[in-house]
Image (tube, rainbow, N blue to C red):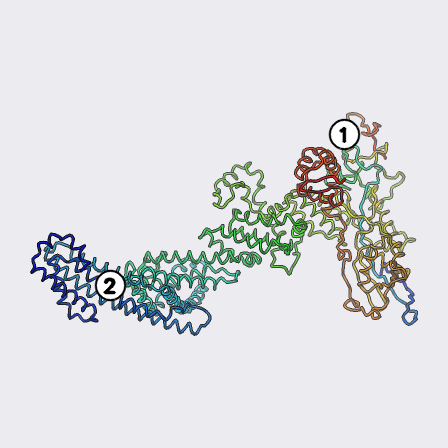
Amino acid sequence: MEFGILIVVGLKTTWRGYFILLLLLLLHCRWHAVASWTWDAQDETCGICRMAFDGCCPDCKLPGDDCPLSKPVYLSLIVFYGIKDTGSPFTLWGACNHAFHLHCILKWVNSQSAQAHCPMCRREWQFKE
Amino acid sequence: MTCDTSTAGCGLEKLESLSDDSITEISENWNGFCSSSEALLKGSGDLSFSDEFVMRAKNLCKHGLSSLVEQHFLRCIEEIFERNGAKRFWSYFEPYRNAAPSETNKDLMQILEEEIQQVICKALEEISSQKQFQEKCLLLLARALQSYEKDKLQGQANPDSTRVYLFSKYQLIVSSVLLASLPHHFPGILHWYFKGRLEELSTIAAANFEDEEELGMDDKMDLDEKSKLPYKCGDLDSDINHKYAVFSENNKLVKNIGMVVRNLRNIGFTSMAEDAYASAIFFLLKDKVHDLAGDDYRNSVLESIKAWIQAVPLQFLRALLDYLGDFTSCNDPSPGLKSPLASHPSLCYSGTGIPSEGLVRWQLRLEYYAYETLQDLRIAKLFEIIVDYPDSAPAIEDLKHCLEYTGQHSKLVDSFISSLRYRLLTAGASTNDILHQYVSTIKALRTIDPAGVFLEAVGEPIREYLRGRKDTIKCIVTMLTDGTGGNPNGPGSSGDSLLEELNRDEESQENTTVDDDINSDERQAWINAQNWEPDPVEADPSKGSRYRRKVDILGMIVGIIGSKDQLVNEYRVMLAEKLLNKSDYDIDAEIRTLELLKIHFGESSMQKCEIMLNDLIDSKRTNTNIKATIKHQPQPEQRDLDVSLENLNATIISSNFWPPIQDEAVNLPEPVEQLLNDYAKRYTEVKTPRKLIWKKNLGSVKLELQFEDRAMQFNVTPLHASIIMQFQDQKKWTSKNLAAAVGVPVDVLNRRINFWISKGVLAESMGADSADHTLTLVENMNDTGKSGPIDGGCEELLAGEDDGERSDASVEDQLRKEMTVYEKFITGMLTNFGSMALDRIHNTLKMFCIADPTYDKSLQQLQSFLSGLVAEEKLEFRDGMYFLKK
């Protein structure tokens, strides 16, 4: 009875001119919906590996949590345990607002000798805090 | 007198020197000889003329006319035999000229048979006695000649030679006379006779045989395993001895037959008699095989046939040969006597220890014939046998043994292929059935011929045919994935065994390392080399022999399609459909199937499918996470919705890795829409920065409708649910308005609404506008009279399935999409060249489309695409050439 909507429908039927009260009870409606997820980034493809964000980087096999964008997703844990984040909202891109696969950009950053630059705009690369 | 000129020729000088005296003596003697010999031969058993006959003969011989005497006498005998013996003999059989054995009148046949039996015996006896008498006469002559010879040569010559010569001559005369006047129906009668006798014998023997069998069974039960084998041999021998004893009880019958055979031999019909009883035995054997084997494929019959051969025909032959004195050692014919050597393991049938050569030959002949008959029988019925294959394994096993013996594999291939063409590869047969039969064929023929040479030949037409069918891939995938069996009422359990095959494959692959790097392991190579066997003669030399070493069902199935990619694609589509229709997250069966497929098709090709399954697992986790947030963050002001979130589950998919999904816009009812938004919001919170895009037309809804007098449960698609939920607010809709409210075209709505009408929930009535129907809720089942089985019961049905609509695009559509890339190339080519044949287009595409979208389609795929273009009137097809439509 959780999601039961009790509706009383008055239905005028031509049947002998009576007004009959019809009871239509919608008991127990369990909805199984289907959705697809997508990264809420501005771009479609990773600038480094040219793969779709919704896919995964060449090194990974599973998309989604296993191949995140730019920053490890322990956020879900934070939310799960009810830790309220204070202040800054979570953003995962670089300071320049360019997004990449995390694995791709880490590889890139590690391959740079001194200061890494964003592969797209050549600005100094910094994870947005 | 004319006949002696030639013989007298040699003694021409003698003739000249003859005196008148001697001439008169000779002529006197001659006349006497003629009359006496005639009298002797005609006199029935009366030998009173013998003295005179002998004397005359001797006298003539003295004059050097021995050859003349001989010839004359033989001629006389021949004439008399022809006149009396042969004619009389044949006249016995005259009444049966037209009495061919037929089944029409059993009783009459029975009587006739009895008659014939007696007639044959009588006739043979008579002619034998006649012959004996004539032989006696002949003996007299022989003696006379002999004594003359002896006088002349003083006993130097072999005294027997004349007799032997005369008798062989006589034998020749008898048989030639008889054969010359042989009526054409005599062999038939003879055959009939033997058949009748043998049948009689076999019924007696069969009764004994059965007793024996029972006895043997009882004995065997008591035995422990260890002593089984040696006991069996001994048992067999003693059995046979015993049986022989039984036979000797029936010896009278055998003796009867033996007598007939001997008489027949006597008159020179050895080969004819042998033919007759051999054919009768074979006939009986054939009958027996047909009787035993018949249409029963569930039992092995080979052993019982062999046992029967031992028990009946061989015993008969043994007795017969024994009687005829053909045994090498006839000195010990007493069969009941068990010799101490009887436990001799091999072919000892009797106390004598060694079977006669003839008997062994007979045994081999009979067994070969039995094998051949059984083989022919089985081959003719091979199609039926394979239809119920797992049950008919014994029959297959029998056939295998037979073929090993006879080696007529090509016969099997030919006849099976023709029956396949006639019965299976027709338009009427469903692809599923063909595939099941194919799998059964592979399995069955694998037992017969592990090398797979014949399988290749047999499988080719099936493969060829299946390639021409459109739904082959789909059927194969269904067979692969349906572990529980697609059609439980189908023939046997052969259909659903492809999954088991996958299982078995897994085991075997664990044992033997992958075949590809076979030479990397030297030991393995050595083992392979040791196990090498030449291919059978029937092998097709144009095909590599290493290729056919491995008979693997999945490989052969995939071989039908050509490449595994198509199969994997189709599997992905089917998996997607299955997963999207799941309302719980239970995917254990799919995971198992996928693991098995991965083993067979390789990890990388199954990558996408794995992601799909992973999505489901993730969805489950995310779903619980989202539910958990509700508990952690109670929001009292939104209580209604929060509680209802409990009832919303979502499958969240990574759309990039799923097959293209049909997206239809649907307006969901307000509360549901709100729920979804809420769910999406929570998802974004949990998985920042990801968001959800709802596929509103997909999924399933479990509804329970409560009416005044009934409660109904449905499992429907969201579209159906939103339609019925519209009726909560408003009792009456016109279809146009309803379509607008739900957000789908009217025709789609009409299609969907049929579901509710058929369930008796809604009623449709024509409105003013013919295209616009009025839909009302049916309040009471009893009013409409439609009430029936649904009364208050719950109805489980996924409504989306019955109109055959699939939530995702099929492989063909996909292929079409892929091919559209090449459309530009093709039109370009055709503008340049004017017209091109299919081959040329294919080759040109292959040559030039190397970069970006690499052209990797098959000729068939291209053809179907081109015919699609022709149908769209973009191209024209004439005389095997494609043109641009002007």
Q: Is residue B668 left or right of residue B169?
A: right
Q: Is residue B342 left or right of residue B308?
A: left
- Type of the residue with mark 2: Glu
Q: Residues within 10 Å of mark 2 (few under 14, many from 20)?
A: many
- Quadrant placement of the C terminus of chain B: top right
Q: Give the image location of residue A56, x and y in percent.
A: 76, 38
Q: Is residue B22 left or right of residue B46?
A: left
Q: Which residue is mark 1?
A: A110
Q: Nearer the viewer, residue B487 or A125?
A: B487
Q: Is residue B846 left or right of residue B547?
A: right
Question: Of helix, strand and loop, which one carries label 2?
Answer: helix
- Type of the residue with mark 1: Asn
The chain that hosts pointer 2 is B
Q: Give the image location of residue B8, x and y in percent.
A: 15, 55
- Quadrant placement of the N terminus of chain B: bottom left
* Residue B311, above or below B646: below
